[in-house]
Structures are given as structure tokens and as C-alpha cells.
Amino acid sequence: MISVRRFAEFAIALSIVALAYNTSAQESKKPFEPVPGMPGKDSVWVPTPFATLEKMYDMAKLTPKDFVMDLGSGDGRAIIVAAKRGAPGLGVEWNQDLVDLSNKLAAEAGVSHLAKFVRGDMFAADISKASVLGLFMLPDQLAKLTPKFLAMQPGSRITVNGFGIPGWTTDSTERATGECGTWCTAHLYIVPAPVEGTWRLGDGNLTLKQSFQMLTGTLTIGGKATPIANGRLNGAEIAFTAGETQYTGRVDGNSMTGAMKGQASGSWSASRK
């Protein structure tokens, strides 16, 4: 039978061994370092080059008044680069190790008061507060998120590295210079106001069909239907031609106001029917 003294000595010895083991394990554990190509929840992680991010934000005309979001934010660089320009932002990332690393890098860059990161599903994220998105996604992922993009405030800017949003014509495409490897192409999309439908314009009806920022339709006055041409939206700004008259204006929910020039001149207004 083991004496109390021998049992106490044995317990102390076990404690010393356990402490030594835990200390050794902690010392051997290396800090997390992301590797390009590492698998994630929905795709592998490939970082956007810093030169391309700068080009994306130049195209978006980013200011400190904007709120930036990145979906699948990886090591946080898209939000940190925006924060260095004075713009607050939020990165949504599924991998908690990447979230922790992003917060660490933001603190090291001195922008943790602007750059925030949370763990979450990029497809479930609420992007309604964002005025600028800085993204690097596959086309099928962009297509899945398109309904959310179109629900953003008109005039919001979506900047994308490499891949375009399927079916949506870019408002601008440019190439970055510097160290960007094969990922130098940046696309800009400006979220258009939703205008599809029929509007009462003066004594006539303006019927619009919308494909992202592109517009087609007819202006019917006195039973005569005139096709509209060159119809386009730039955020909440609208422009189109009907016959020999050019219309420009601004959309505000269910109303539009603007100016005409050409065959007819003056101001115009329309309300959604």
C-alpha cells in the first residue's frame, strides 16, 4: 500500500511532467500563417495584390465618408488598405484564424479603430450599410450575391479583382501597375436605382425595362409610342433619348426629375404608376 508521503511525491512528479509537456507544446506551436491556396468554406484563399486594391479604391473614389465591406476577407488586407485611406470597414470571414490574424494586422497597422473583422458566412452577411465593396470572388459566387448587390443604395460602388459579375456590364475596367502578378485587372460596378416599370411623365407614359444599369422602353404620348435610346443609369442619375429629345435627371424612390434638351426643352418630372 502506497504511503501518503509516496503518493504526494508521485503527484508532484506528475505535475512537473505535465507542466513541462504543456510548456514544450506551447513553445513548439507556431503562429498561424495563411498560405495562398489554402482551402476555405466556399473556395481557396488567394489574396488580392496590394497594387490591385489601391487601383480598385482609386476607381471607386473611396473617401473617409464611405463604409467598406469585404466578403471572404482572408487576412483582412482589403479592409486594412481602405482604413489606411481613412475609410471605416468590416471584413466577414469564416475562418476564425484569419479573423484573429486580421484583427492583429489591423492593430499593428494602427487602424484597428476603423478596420473590424467578424466570423461569418459571406452569403448571409448584411451588406446594406456598405457604400463600397472590395471583393475577390469566383463568378458563381458573384452571381449568387447579385440580388444583394442590387439591393444596395443606388450609387454604391462594387469593386472586384479579376472576375466580373456575370451578366452585368462594368462601368469601368482598368489594370493596376506594379507588383500584381496575374491579378492586375480591376472592375467597377455602380449600383443602379431600380426604375423598371411604368411612369407617368407629363401627359404620357414612360415604360422602362432594366438590365442592371442599361435601359430600354418607350415613351407614349397621345397614343404615339417612341422607343427610347441610349438609356442608362449611373447610380441614381438617369439619361435617355426619346425621338429628338434628350432627358437627364435623378431618381428618388418613386419619382424622377430632370431637364430636357433638343426638340423639347425645360424641366420634366415623372412618378411611378
Image (spheres, helix red, strand yellow):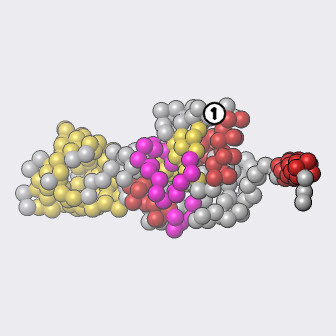
Expressed as whole percent of the image width and height from the top left, the position of residue 108 reads 71, 35
The amino acid beneath tag 1 is Val
Where 264 sits versus 163, above or below? above
Tell me the element at label 1: loop
Expressed as whole percent of the image width and height from the top left, the position of residue 157 reads 47, 47
Expressed as whole percent of the image width and height from the top left, the position of residue 180 reads 71, 52
Q: Can you say which quadrant of the picture contains the C terminus?
A: bottom left
Say which quarter of the image contains residue 266.
Answer: top left
Expressed as whole percent of the image width and height from the top left, the position of residue 233 reads 35, 51
Q: Nearer the viewer, residue 255 or 7?
A: 7
| Segment colored magenta | 118-141
Q: Nearer the viewer, residue 181 or 147?
A: 147
Residue drawn at (67%, 35%), measured in percent from left and top? 107
Magenta stretch secondary structure, dominant: loop
Q: Is residue 128 magenta?
A: yes
Residue drawn at (14%, 58%), measured in percent from left and top? 220
Q: Which residue is mark 1?
A: 111
Residue reaching furthest bottom?
140
Q: Is residue 249 magenta?
A: no
